[in-house]
Amino acid sequence: MTETAAEDWKHWSDHRAASVSAPHGQLALTGTHWLEPEPGVLPGLPGLWWADAEGVRLRAVAADGITVGGATVGGDASPVDGEVLLRPDTDPAADIATLGDVLLVPIEREGELALRVFDPAAPRRASFAGISAYPYSPEWAVPAVFTPFDAADAQSVVVPNADGKERPLAVTGQIAFTVAGEHRTLTVSSAGDRLSGVIADATSGIDTYRFRFITLPAPDADGRTVLDLNRAYLPPCAFADHFICPFPPPGNRLDFAVEAGEKQVLTR
């Protein structure tokens, strides 16, 4: 069983490296531009961009070469010639724009709208040499029990973000587990039917990035799940400075070394 688990982890690790280094993966992010209510120019992009109650607005001419809608990069959609609305990623019918090979993605965070720019020619993507990680070790995969907060106690915890701002982080309960002889709890959020968390430990900022993310399988009817710290992974802001990752909430900074999971981004 250990061999199979190790093989699964290797496949997961390889997929992680391929995903972040894809042409429009996390390493390709070159900007997150927060938009004002008045039309304005964004660095390196044609057209005028602004935000209103409906989403992101763009005013451009055909010669600018921006396409919007279901078009894929390199597709044959007609360029924008006039004014269009782009719905952000929080909308079920979200829009994506393209400018040549560059992907332009409207996002919404806490009611604020921005445009993200993913450029396959980003320097960080060009210099990427992999993700360093600790060797797989089965003792870092442990049973955990999820206890949801009461509906009345459902809460958002305000935490610093990588861009220097503080934002609320929705949390839905805690997991309890024992690892390396230590009994601990972590505050987690719901991500669909799965659980997710932001953690730090005694390796953070030394051997590993300053914090990491974890994802746990959906808990069963009794709250049982598995915390596999071999799959502790680097947040998007480890790959590009323009992501706004949340820092760990109070209580999620473990006082021992978690020598498992991803460590650092490697560069050439």
Image (cartoon, rainbow, N blue to C red):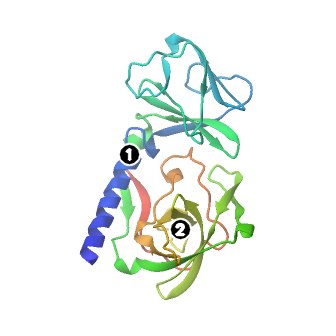
Q: Residue at x 41, y 29 (%)?
A: 72
Q: Nearer the viewer, residue 215 or 247?
A: 215
Query: Residue 202 at x, y = what percent?
Result: 54, 74
Dot 2, how many residues are within 10 Å of its Cα: few (below 14), some (14-19), or many (20+)? some
Q: Nearer the viewer, residue 133 or 8?
A: 8
Three-letter amino acid code at the position of disc 1: Ser
Q: Earlier in the sequence, mark 2 or mark 1?
A: 1
Q: Is residue 136 left or right of residue 112?
A: left
In 3D space, how far apart are the residues under numbered discs 2 and 1 (Cα atoms)? 23 Å
Instruction: Give the quadrant of residue 136.
Output: bottom left
Q: Can the viewer see residue 130 in this picture?
A: no
Find disc 2 in the rendering and name its residue. Answer: 204
Query: Residue 45 at x, y = what percent?
Result: 55, 24
Q: Nearer the viewer, residue 198 or 241?
A: 198
Find disc 1 in the rendering and name its residue. Answer: 21
Q: Residue furthest left?
A: 3
Three-letter amino acid code at the position of disc 2: Ser
Q: Residue furthest front?
A: 221
